[in-house]
């Protein structure tokens, strides 16, 4: 009995030691997980602050009064909130008129880009033709080469626009100057070389390559032609990519400043925002750079609001479109 009791006691001690070791191991794992989670949270908060702090500062400063701007005790939160800066900027910019004109052109350009880029992407994905790889390499070059590298040729082409001498033939020997209008941007977009069109072609190409060919074969057997199959079947199945490209096109075209300034387009919201600082100073006789900056912050907030609203409305569809389009995978 004594031997049995000693054996049981030894087993109990061994079991307790094993339990204690397991508890220490679990505690160690929990501590490591907590430290890693805390470290990740600190890093994410730091990155978020770096990214969002300028936007937060711009948004809060837009509501500053003149006294808040000169008060050293005020940094982020204003003591005397005011919307006077917004009212002045809306009047100086002719905000609603410019916004309506910008959004109208933006939406038209988006529709053109979706149609043209989807057709080009579909052609590269489904048809074989001479120099296909070389032409697709040009699409990749459109993505890689910066716009600044071709700004001078583009400016010259559209300053003296002509097509094989046809324009000069019907215009008394003179080429057309398309600057200070939206025509150059529409022409580039319609020809598949507009703002970021290379990326959109690549997205559609990747998506159409992932669709089964049996869909088209079934349509061809039923007597459908190429264009009918594309518009009524393939483009309908490519809705995720269409949504993705539509959102990208609207946002990037809306925020475009390079081509708008290059072609001297005046009635665009980004151009109006860039002139607010000087316009406010001249109209209201404000000589303080700090106060002028408050008006510019208000203009930036007004510029950002339409894009934020569009993204919030289409966020669900946009995220789904990104996941199912050719951007990933």
Image (tube, rainbow, N blue to C red):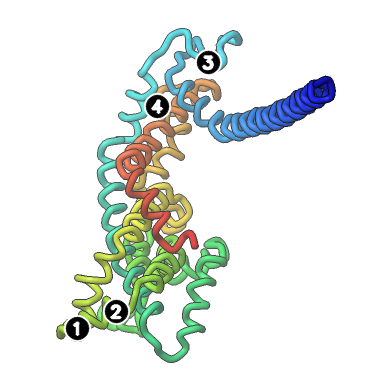
Which numbered disc, 2 or 4, marks the residue closer to the eye? Answer: 2
Direction from residue 215 to residue 254 in the image, left or right: right
Which label's residue is closer to the chain start, 3 or 2? 3
The secondary element bearing badge 3 is classed as helix
Q: Position of residue 113 (x, y in %)?
A: 33, 63
Label 1 sits on residue: 225
Which numbered disc, 4 or 3, marks the residue closer to the eye? Answer: 3
Q: Position of residue 253 (x, y in %)?
A: 39, 53
Task: Give the residue at x 56% y 62%.
Answer: 146
Contact, mark 1 vs mark 2 (Cβ under 8 Å) = no
The secondary element bearing badge 1 is classed as loop
Mark 1 closeness class: few <14, some 14–19, many ≥20 residues within 10 Å: few
Query: In the image shown, does 216 or 50 lie closer to the viewer?
Result: 216
Task: Give the residue at x 72% y 27%.
Answer: 19
Label 2 sits on residue: 214
Which label's residue is closer to the chain start, 1 or 3? 3
The secondary element bearing badge 2 is classed as helix
Q: Position of residue 185 (x, y in %)?
A: 36, 62
Give the number of the disc on residue 69: 3
Query: In the image shown, does 12 or 164 lie closer to the viewer?
Result: 12
Dividing the picture into quarters, in which one does residue 207 lie? bottom left
Label 4 sits on residue: 283
């Amino acid at each position: 009995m004594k031997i049995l009791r000693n054996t049981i006691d030894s087993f109990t001690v061994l079991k307790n030691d094993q339990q204690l070791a397991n508890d220490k191991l679990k505690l160690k794992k929990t501590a490591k997980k907590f430290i890693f989670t805390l470290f990740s949270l600190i890093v994410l908060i730091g990155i978020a602050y770096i990214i969002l702090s300028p936007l937060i500062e711009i948004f809060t400063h837009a509501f500053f009064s003149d006294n808040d701007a000169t008060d050293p005790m005020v940094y982020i939160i204003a003591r005397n909130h005011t919307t006077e800066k917004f009212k002045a900027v809306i009047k100086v910019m002719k905000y609603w008129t410019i916004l309506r004109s910008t959004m109208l052109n933006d939406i038209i350009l988006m529709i053109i880009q979706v149609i043209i880029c989807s057709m080009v992407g579909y052609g590269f994905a489904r048809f074989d033709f001479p120099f296909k790889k070389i032409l697709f390499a040009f699409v990749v070059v459109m993505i890689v080469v910066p716009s600044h590298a071709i700004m001078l040729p583009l400016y010259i082409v559209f300053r003296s626009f002509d097509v094989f001498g046809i324009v000069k033939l019907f215009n008394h020997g003179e080429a057309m100057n398309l600057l200070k209008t939206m025509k150059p941007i529409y022409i580039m977009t319609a020809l598949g070389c507009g703002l970021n069109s290379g990326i959109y072609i690549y997205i559609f190409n990747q998506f159409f390559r992932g669709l089964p060919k049996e869909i088209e074969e079934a349509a061809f057997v039923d007597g459908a032609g190429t264009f009918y199959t594309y518009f009524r079947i393939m483009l309908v199945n490519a809705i995720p990519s269409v949504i993705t490209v539509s959102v990208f096109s609207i946002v990037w075209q809306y925020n475009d400043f390079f081509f708008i300034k290059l072609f001297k387009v005046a009635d665009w919201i980004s151009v109006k925002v860039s002139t607010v600082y000087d316009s406010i100073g001249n109209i209201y006789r404000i000589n303080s750079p700090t106060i002028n900056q408050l008006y510019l912050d208000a203009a930036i907030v007004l510029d950002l609001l339409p894009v934020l609203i569009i993204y919030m409305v289409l966020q669900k569809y946009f995220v789904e479109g990104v996941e199912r389009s050719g951007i990933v995978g």
